[in-house]
Image (cartoon, grey):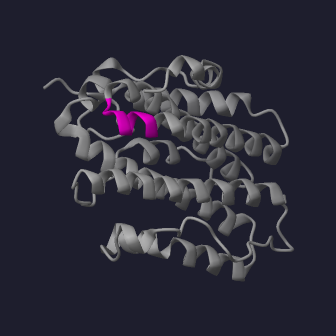
Amino acid sequence: MTDLNSYNDLLEPIYGFLKCTTPESWINEAKRPENLNTILIDHLMCELKAGQSAMYLIRKYAVDTQSTQNLLDWFKPYEDFAYRKIGNLETLRGKSSISKAIIAKSTSPYSQDLIDKMVMLIKEELHHFYQVLEIMDQRNIAYEPVQASRYAKGLLSHMATHEPQALTDKLIIGAYIEARSCERFAKLAPHMEEDIAKFYISLLRSEARHYQDYLTLAEAIAGEDITQRVAYFGQLEADLISSPDNDFKFHSGAPLAR
């Protein structure tokens, strides 16, 4: 397995950004062989939801009508699989890239940078979705829908309702979700089978870049110091991660004692 020490420079900013580390009790639960199915299926859905969140941002704030339809068409095979059980590994092969144009609407006050960063993120998340599905297929793990954890909803419920604060908050939340994912992949890798461990380590660079992209966009769009808002969501995120949680998922809190 690749030595995680070589990723220290990449992980150090992540650990500095997050207000707590993953509880040992969560790691102990996650490395149990009987929880592998849950980890993989929930990870699969996290990749799709991360892509959907990015798509929502550029649909709502940045792109023209035709680009909105192009984005919906791009996601359709993945959403058909996840929500309607239509399709399989073969039908999703090679679908993570988009060939149609994504163009900014003339009335959008937000830069092309928002579109470029989010389209790149979507490509990577959908490719990761496919890679998780490959790992599941190799282990004959059937996909079954799982209920989302409290994590993302718990963060989103504290968003502002006015603009541009709502968009800034959504971007800050995106930064925390990507940073936590990066941290958990690093924590989990040493305890997983070799192919999964290598896969998780291969994700560290993209997750770390996604966190930075979200934070950079939040700062640019806010146009003012967002330190206090970042700290506010950082504490909310840490509370969700460190507090007791009776639902074990990829982003769940500290498992209740068995």
Instruction: Between residue 228 and residue 54, name the one nearer to us.
Output: 54
Q: Which residues are magenta?
A: 192-199
Q: Nearer the viewer, residue 206 or 153?
A: 206
Q: Quadrant of the N terminus?
A: top left
Q: Is residue 131 left or right of residue 121?
A: left
Query: In the rendering, at what x and y percent does residue 249 appear?
Result: 31, 41
Eyeballing the image, is 228 above or below 88? above
- Which quarter of the rendering shows the C terminus? top left
Q: Residue at x 58, y 47 (%)?
A: 159
Residue 187 belongs to magenta span: no
Answer left or right for 192 relative to 120.
Answer: left
Q: Position of residue 77 (x, y in %)?
A: 45, 74
Q: Is residue 217 above or below residue 21?
A: below
Residue 193 lies in the magenta stretch? yes
Q: Is residue 246 above or below residue 123?
A: above
Residue 212: give x, y in percent of width and height: 69, 37
Q: What residue lies at 70% left-to-right and 83% top-to-bottom? A: 66
Q: Quadrant of residue 56?
A: bottom right
- Kindly tell me whether residue 110 is visible in this rendering: no
Q: Main secondary structure of the magenta part?
A: helix
